Image: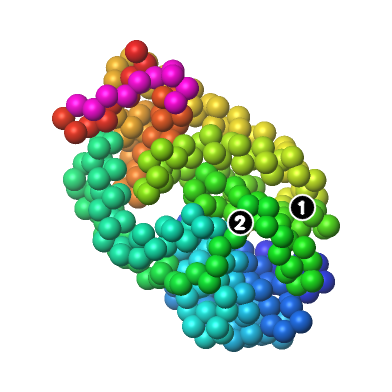
């Protein structure tokens, strides 16, 4: 993939390397009369900022010229450099109110890890795995340091970005306050992690709002973007693609199947979400994948519960799901 791709006049996609499984993240630069607006930033990890600086130099820009940063969601690969870039440039940072709240609530990393631990314990992760997970999360602390948002983005808000209209489209699911950005004139969707060409984004419960149902929110938000006239989708990971509705149909089918697997897993006997995740994803996952698998199983189970198809009870501090 080209490191720098000019999508529209003065509107660029920059692909940054990162030491995660996804390997690359796409950020976007819109040249303004003075300086530029940046959409997402890449993580605060070795080599990423230099790669961004080099790409910016190639289009006659520098980090110092960044005037504004728009963030799709607060995962480290999307916002990790927001603070460091704003420190150097004075750029204003905008994101949804929900994601801003998340940044404030979890400015203390210890609190986030404690909530994750609690969730893991209730849903059947063993202590050893939880200890390893806590170490993994601590190790990534610097990848997404907290920052001070300048303001928030509202649903349907229209911004002028690089002389073009850009609409804020809330697309909760992967993260509760995830936003995508739509250019109605150009029919371009900057999708963040909401719709990806190769994989489905991980769905996790929201640690601040336990009543949030990631799967139904995600599916509704897929309908929302599928109803827009879109000629090209630019995802945060992977190549651009045209057939948004086709991709949305595939993702819906994927979750319908996975919900079926979750239902089958709790049909014989009551199970924790962790046991269900093993039934779906197998027994041999490394701890971090086991954690992601647990999240996926859990969000499908709470959807079935909300539909009245299965029930849940708590026994000895463990949350058990069953179909009767
Ligand atoms: Zn993400």
Name the residue at 77% across, 52% down. 232
* Mark positioned earlier in the residue sequence (2 or 1): 2
Mark 1, residue position: 232
Q: Quadrant of the C terminus?
A: top left
**Residue 118 placement (x, y as % from top left):** 25, 45
Residue 236 lies in the magenta-colored region: no
- Mark 1 falls on what kind of element? strand
Q: Is mark 1 within 8 Å of ligand 1?
A: no
The quarter in which the N terminus is drawn is: bottom right
- Which disc is residue 154 wearing? 2
x and y percentages locating residue 171 in the rendered image? 59, 47
Q: Nearer the viewer, mark 2 or mark 1?
A: 2
Q: Residue at x 79, y 55 (%)?
A: 184
| For residue 134, above or below residue 37 | above
Does 67 sit left or right of 284 as displayed? right
Magenta stretch: includes residue 310: yes
Q: Are marks 2 and 1 in contact (CB under 8 Å)?
A: no
Q: Position of residue 224 (x, y in %)?
A: 67, 41
User: Which residue sits at x=52%, y=52%?
Assistant: 177
Query: In this figure, what is the number of numbered marks?
Result: 2
- Judged from the image, the secondary structure of the residue bearing numbered disc 2 is loop
Q: Residue at x 27, y 30 (%)?
A: 319
Q: Nearer the viewer, residue 84 or 131?
A: 84
Q: Residues within 10 Å of mark 1 (few under 14, many from 20)?
A: some
* Residues drawn in magenta: 306-315
Displayed quadrant of residue 51: bottom right
Q: Quadrant of residue 189?
A: bottom right
- 146 in relation to 311, above or below: below
Q: Is residue 112 left or right of residue 36?
A: left
Task: Give the colouring mode of the picture.
Answer: rainbow
Asked if one can make out residue 107 in the rendered structure from this viewpoint, the answer is: yes
């Amino acid at each position: 993939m080209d490191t720098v791709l000019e999508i529209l006049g003065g509107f660029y996609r920059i692909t940054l390397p990162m030491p995660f499984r996804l390997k690359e993240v796409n950020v976007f630069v819109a040249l303004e009369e003075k300086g530029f607006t940046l959409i997402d930033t890449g993580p605060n990890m070795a080599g990423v900022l230099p790669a961004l600086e080099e790409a910016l130099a190639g289009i006659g820009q520098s980090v110092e010229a960044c005037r504004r940063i728009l963030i799709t969601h607060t995962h480290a690969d999307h916002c990790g450099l927001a603070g460091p870039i704003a420190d150097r440039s004075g750029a204003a940072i905008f994101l949804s109110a929900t994601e801003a709240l998340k940044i404030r609530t979890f400015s203390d990393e210890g609190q986030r890890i404690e909530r994750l631990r609690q969730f893991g314990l209730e849903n059947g992760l063993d202590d050893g795995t939880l200890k390893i997970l806590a170490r993994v999360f601590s190790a990534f602390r610097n990848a997404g340091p907290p920052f001070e948002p300048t303001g928030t983005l509202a649903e349907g808000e229209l911004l002028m970005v690089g002389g073009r209209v850009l609409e804020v489209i809330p697309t909760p699911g992967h993260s509760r306050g995830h936003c995508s950005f739509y250019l109605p004139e150009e029919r371009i969707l900057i999708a963040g992690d909401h719709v990806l060409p190769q994989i489905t984004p991980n769905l996790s419960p929201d640690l601040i709002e336990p009543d949030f149902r990631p799967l139904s929110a995600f599916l509704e938000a897929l309908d929302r973007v599928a109803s827009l006239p879109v000629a090209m989708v630019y995802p945060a990971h992977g190549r651009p693609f045209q057939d948004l509705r086709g991709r949305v149909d595939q993702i819906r089918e994927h979750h319908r199947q996975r919900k079926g697997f979750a239902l089958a897993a709790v049909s014989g006997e009551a199970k924790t979400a962790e046991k269900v995740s093993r039934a779906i994803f197998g027994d041999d996952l490394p701890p971090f994948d086991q954690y992601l698998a647990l999240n996926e199983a859990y969000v499908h189970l709470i959807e079935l519960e909300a539909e009245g198809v299965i029930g849940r009870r708590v026994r000895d501090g463990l949350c058990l799901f069953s179909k009767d």
